[in-house]
Amino acid sequence: MEIRPTTDQDRDDFVDTMHTAFGRFPETPDEHGGGVWWAALEMDRGVLAVTEDGRPVGTAGAYSFELTLPGGALVPAAGVTAVGVVPSHRRRGVLSAMMRHQLTELRARGEILSVLLASEAMIYRRFGYGPATYSGRLTVPRHRAAFAAPRAGGEGGADAGSVEVLRSDRCRALLEEIYDRYRRVQPGALSRPGHWWKAGAGQPPIAPAPRHIAVHRDAHGTPDGYVSYAISDPDVLKVDEIIAVDDAAYTALARHVLEHDLVGEIVIKHVPAGHPLRWQFADFRAAETGPDGDWLWVRILDVPRALTARGWRTDGDLVLEVTDPFLGSGPERHLLSVRDGKADCVRTDRAPDLSLDVSDLGSVYLGGTTPSTLVRAGHIKAHHAEAPELADTLFRTERAPHCLHWF
Ligand SMILES: CC(=O)SCCNC(=O)CCNC(=O)[C@H](O)C(C)(C)COP(=O)(O)OP(=O)(O)OC[C@H]1O[C@@H](n2cnc3c(N)ncnc32)[C@H](O)[C@@H]1OP(=O)(O)O
């Protein structure tokens, strides 16, 4: 078995092999009016597993994204995708070989982390990935969707901006621009490179399937959010995504879909964990929630650079002893010292506060999971009684990280 990098010439083999692994047939671009999700694949970043007689049996790809970190820094992030092994060649180590090849190559390129969306939660921890952002779904009967008047006043909740309904095929450039503003201020969000929008790759509203788009503009007329949605039979309004630069835009767009006429039920996907929307309903039980699930998984490739790249809100020192069994390193002790929002991270011989696997570091890195949760779960070892709270305080972020980009 050979694991080799792909080029543009491998595109057909890659797409065919990946679909066989997923038990599907490739759709032709025309079936979706001009866009297929794999149109954005970067063939110079893929790998193929090939048998001795030249048959491709495994695939893995990587997209070039930027990830927004707590504090607002943007870092390159490889978005691992299209991972598959054909059914006849499973459980012989093909995936493990591809992951080793890919992670080694990413490290050699100097990347500090990679991310993925896991088809099954049992696959990726062994390779050092941990779930790092979470997303939920709200289902709301239209007749229970009334909003409460804000109890703190605020002009009775009146929106100082405006909402305009457009068709997705007539406002792609505007959507791209709003998405880019949003993802720069939302920790955990990924960029959507320009060629995704051009190729119609991904899910609506990037894909060309027709959608209604309500665009929100602030009081000065500047676009600061949109909601993409469609009404299906019999009368369910399904929201693909609400993209908003701030809470006011989010609330106005949520109201737009929740107050829609001739609709019996509204389903909003990708609601961030802990989002205030539920609190805004007059009827606290208006929304059914769930499934609440993991979305982005993070794999730290360079511990000191990852820890110094993100922003921190509280000063403090913490010694982390990190083990990375898949890439064969560790335990390595890192002294994290935060002063005025910035961190230094150096190797140390000091006694550790916490010992943890690199996958658990991935889970706490963006602030979506507290270290003490994983201490209580028995996965992170605290070496003294104050360590979990100290780590929670340091890793805490202003708002929960969130990602809704599908890849
Ligand atoms: C980011 C993404 O693209 S997510 C998409 C992932 N792909 C899919 O779900 C498509 C369908 N599934 C597949 O193609 C394959 O089953 C894969 C890619 C998940 C696994 O490929 P394989 O070559 O069989 O994996 P490999 O033999 O390297 O297994 C490595 C280890 O993971 C375990 N493992 C692999 N897949 C799974 C799974 N789905 N559930 C639980 N354990 C698994 C194996 O048992 C093995 O464990 P061991 O080391 O303790 O023996």
Image (cartoon, helix red, strand yellow):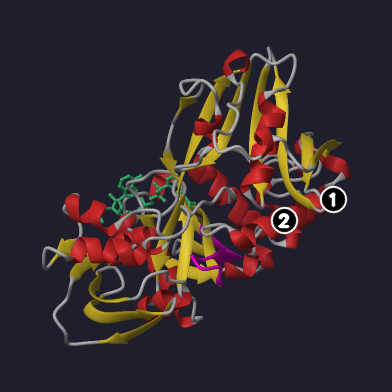
* Image vertical order of residue 131 relative to residue 64, above or below: above
User: Residue 178, can we see it?
Assistant: yes
- Residue at image point 63% right, 17% down: 142
Does the stretch in magenta take in 233? Answer: no
Circle 2 residues within 10 Å: few <14, some 14–19, many ≥20: some
Q: Nearer the viewer, mark 2 or mark 1?
A: 1
* Image vertical order of residue 149 relative to residue 192, above or below: above
The residue under label 1 is 221
| Amino acid marked by disc 1 | Gly
Query: x and y percent of residue 89 in the render?
Result: 39, 50
Mark 2 → mark 1, Cα distance in angstroms: 27 Å
Query: Left or right: 263 with respect to 73?
Result: right
Query: x and y percent of residue 394 in the render?
Result: 33, 67
* Image vertical order of residue 119 relative to residue 384, above or below: above
Image quarter hosting the N terminus: bottom left
- Residue at image point 61% right, 21% down: 146
Label 2 residue SS: helix
- Residue at image point 69% right, 44% down: 249
Q: Which residues are magenta?
A: 60-74
- Residue 87 tag number: none
Q: Does the magenta stretch mainly form a helix, a strand or a loop?
A: strand
User: Residue 129, can we see it?
Assistant: no
The residue under label 2 is 196
| Amino acid marked by disc 2 | Trp
Question: Residue farthest to the left?
Answer: 384
Between 106 and 296, the residue placed more toward the observer is 296
Label 1 residue SS: loop
- Residue at image point 24% right, 69% down: 325
Is the residue indicated by label 1 positioned so its CB lies within 8 Å of ligand 1? no
Query: x and y percent of residue 108 in the render?
Result: 46, 82
Circle 1 residues within 10 Å: few <14, some 14–19, many ≥20: few
